[in-house]
Image: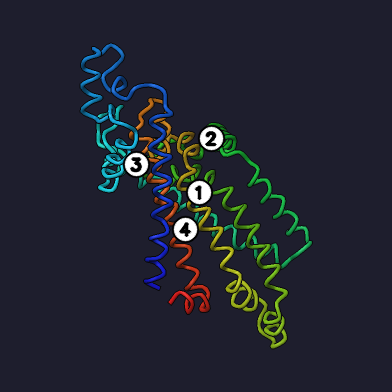
Amino acid sequence: MFKYIVRRLLLLVPILLGVSIIVFGIMFLTPGDPAVMMLGEAAPQAEVEALRERLGLDQPPHVQYGRWLANVAQLDFGRSIRSSRLVTDEISQRLWPTVELAVLATLLAIAIGVPLGVISATRRDTVLDHGTTVLAFVGLAMPVFWQGLMMIILFSLVLEWLPPSGRLGGWQYYVLPVVTLGTSAIAAITRMTRTTMLETLTQDYVRTARSKGLRRNRVIYRHALSNALIPIVTVIGLQFGGLLSGAVITETIFSWPGIGRLAVDAIRSRDVPVIQGVVMVFAVLYALVNLFTDVLYAYLDPRLRTRYS
């Protein structure tokens, strides 16, 4: 298993290198001079040129990329143009709220999506099955920004049950952003659970378990669901990685102080070092989530565990 993890980590290296090239190219695609952004439009040209030389911006692109990549390997993304703080400090301050939001949304999606998918599969072609399918398609098709705004209007302005934005410590501040972020994940997990369970329930070992007189719930959850978990876990892993990097809209709507909102603020102010740092962090997190999902397969399927070892 350890050797498999090492091999997977080595495979991530060229992927992250490719992402780093794209991320570094943002600086050349973004209009404007970083030195002018840092000093201001009214700065003398001599000061601008001196700053460009000090930052290495007068070097060829491949030299700048090599220097930047060496700094990134040491977790040094430079300083923010907007605040002059270290980018690593900016990201570390905002990273936990985003992880917290993504974890809660994923747990909510699992707690609702898996049972709904099982119920829908075991009651195929019933009113409950059709209703669950319709709700899943609505959840997948509903735009996040529209859902967030509608929830703020309903639960904050009309009913006055929950705060509209912010993260001040109370559980009330988590409800709206977690539900908004997790809705599409609930729909995806529900659909995958239903599809996988429908296929698993037709297998011979399930019919054998039923013929032995085992209780219905034991057949469904102990035999069918446990053998249908790999596709479900795959979707959960992809959804969690997507929630980490896709919380930008949700954090902006609810004024959530996460890394997604940091990215939006950096884009508005053309803060290139922060944008580069945020995108690289998103890429690394997504890659690590996929690695963890692959390793989890071995614990769900003994055949894979034997192959990996």
Mark 2 or 4: the one toward you? 4
Inter-mark Cα distance, 1 to 3: 17 Å
Q: Secondary structure at mark 3?
A: helix
At which x and y percent is residue 83?
27, 28
Tell whether 236 sits left or right of 19: right
For discs 1 and 3, the disc positioned in front in the rendered view: 1
Query: On the image, numbered disc 1 is attached to which residue?
Result: 242
- Residue 297: image x %, image y %? 50, 69
Query: Disc 2 or 3, which lies upstream in sequence?
Result: 3
- Residue at horizontal 46 percent and vertical 37 percent from the top: 163
Give the x, y percent position of residue 287: 43, 54
Check the picture and name the quadrant holding the N terminus. bottom left
Provide the secondary structure element on which disc 4 rests. Answer: helix
Please tell me how crowded label 2 is: few (under 14), some (14-19), or many (20+) other residues with Cα within 10 Å.
Answer: many
Quarter of the image for residue 59 reads top left
Q: Residues under labels 2 and 3: Cα distance?
A: 23 Å
- Residue, disc 2: 152
Tag 1: amino acid: Gly
**At label 2, which amino acid type do we have?**
Ile
Quickly name the residue at label 3: 94
